[in-house]
């Protein structure tokens, strides 16, 4: 194994978020309210299976043990099963996860599991079908819920459900969500709305801090769980009376970036050091041949030394990310 990927702040990177498409078939208010629009740029084909194999191998050789396949909606890729298989068969990779809107899960999740997918996150921003439709732009609530049930049927022991918290829309639904996970092995992850370049007005209207939820959980006997090295940024809480768990992702909290352990590859093969950072570093020219492996690692290592200590979101700096689908959330 090559040297572990590490930045100048001694943060080690065990976790790769790999976007395989920026196309999505939902129109979520906080991400793509007007629906997906192609960039129109020339040579904008998405990263291929061979390129995926090479970049994941480079990361695995430098200590990465978890890969999350993201989008857009990653299951829109016709070769999604092969992508899962390619990642899962990479020596050193122990967790293969995906984040999906769940609309294809009922039909396809058994195939994903067979291909090697170990963990699933599904976005469900409301348990009210009408509000779900309002937030996502799609009347697919019942299909998504059937997909979650199917995931349990095919053998997943836990499903993570992502909920973007929005003031005056869904943040009052905590009791409903808690009731839902009482007897289900679901880790409910409340994610604070994040400011991106195109979303200033929506952010101002709907941002709500996760602190109130955390205070409510602690006051009601929920306990903080210890993080594993390749876990994401959630603060996870457990309760003896609940089968489910609660995760809180609060990027505006001080020291949020101290435990950063993940890097991102966009669907166009660029390395992004932060969801809110910069334009991204081109890697595609080094993903064409297996012989470029050492050079690829060297370029990533060199760029890693420029990673900032923080995303500075709390200072109102939302970076250059136009919307979350563009580099896989």
Image: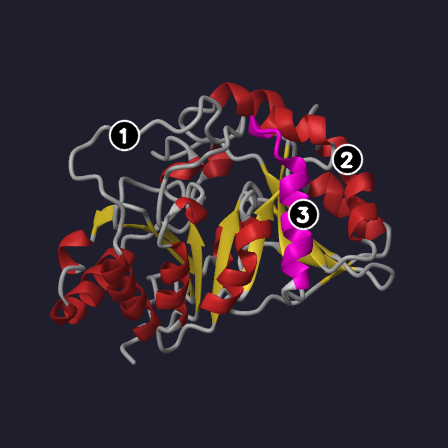
Front residue (pair 103, 285): 103
- Marks counted in the figure total 3
Image height check: is 119 above or below 283?
A: below
Q: Which mark is residue 318?
A: none
Q: Which residue is drawn at 22% across and 66% down?
A: 297
Residue 307 falls within the magenta-colored stretch: no
Q: What stretch is highlighted in magenta?
A: 136-153
The residue labelled by disc 2 is: 173
| Mark with earlier residue (3, 1) | 1
Q: Residue 146 carries which label?
A: 3
In the structure shown, which secondary structural element does the residue marked by tag 2 occupy? helix
The residue labelled by disc 1 is: 39
Please indicate, yes or no, whether residue 114 appears anywhere in the rendered image: yes
Residue 137 falls within the magenta-colored stretch: yes
Q: Which of marks 3 and 1 is in front?
A: 3
Between the C-alphas of marks 2 and 1, the distance is 36 Å
Q: Where is residue 300 in the image (x, y as percent from the top left)?
A: 24, 60
Between the C-alphas of marks 3 and 1, the distance is 33 Å
Quick one: quadrant of the N terminus?
Answer: bottom left
Q: Nearer the viewer, mark 3 or mark 2?
A: 3
**58 relative position to 142: left or right:** left
Image height check: is 141 above or below 109?
A: above
Q: Position of residue 157 (x, y in %)?
A: 67, 66
Front residue (pair 114, 126): 114
């Amino acid at each position: 194994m090559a040297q572990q990927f590490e930045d100048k702040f001694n943060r080690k990177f065990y976790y790769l978020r790999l976007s395989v498409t920026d196309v999505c078939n939902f129109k979520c208010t906080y991400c793509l309210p007007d629906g997906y629009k192609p960039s129109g740029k020339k040579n904008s084909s998405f990263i291929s299976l061979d390129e995926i194999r090479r970049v994941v191998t480079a990361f695995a050789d430098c200590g990465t043990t978890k890969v999350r396949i993201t989008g857009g909606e990653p299951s829109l890729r016709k070769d999604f099963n092969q992508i899962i298989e390619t990642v899962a068969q990479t020596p050193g990779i122990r967790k293969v996860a995906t984040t999906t809107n769940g609309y294809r899960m009922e039909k396809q999740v058994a195939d994903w599991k067979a291909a090697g997918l170990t963990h699933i996150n599904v976005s469900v921003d409301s348990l009210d079908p009408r509000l779900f439709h309002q937030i996502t732009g799609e009347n697919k609530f019942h299909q998504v819920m059937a997909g979650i049930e199917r995931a349990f049927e095919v053998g997943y022991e836990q499903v993570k459900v992502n909920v973007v918290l929005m003031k005056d829309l869904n943040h009052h639904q905590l009791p409903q969500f808690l009731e839902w996970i009482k007897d289900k092995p679901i880790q409910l992850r409340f994610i604070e709305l994040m400011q991106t370049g195109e979303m200033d007005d929506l952010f101002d209207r709907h941002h709500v801090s996760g602190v109130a939820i955390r205070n409510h959980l602690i006051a009601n006997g929920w306990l903080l769980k210890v993080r594993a090295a390749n876990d994401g940024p959630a603060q996870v809480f457990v309760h003896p009376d609940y089968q489910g768990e609660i995760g809180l992702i609060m990027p505006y909290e001080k020291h949020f970036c101290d435990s950063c352990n993940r890097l991102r590859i966009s669907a166009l093969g660029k390395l992004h050091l932060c969801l809110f950072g910069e334009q991204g570093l081109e890697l595609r020219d080094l993903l064409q041949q297996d012989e470029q492996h050492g050079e690829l690692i060297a370029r990533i290592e060199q760029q890693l030394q420029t990673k900032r200590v923080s995303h500075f979101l709390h200072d109102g700096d939302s970076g250059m990310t136009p919307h979350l689908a563009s580099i896989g959330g």
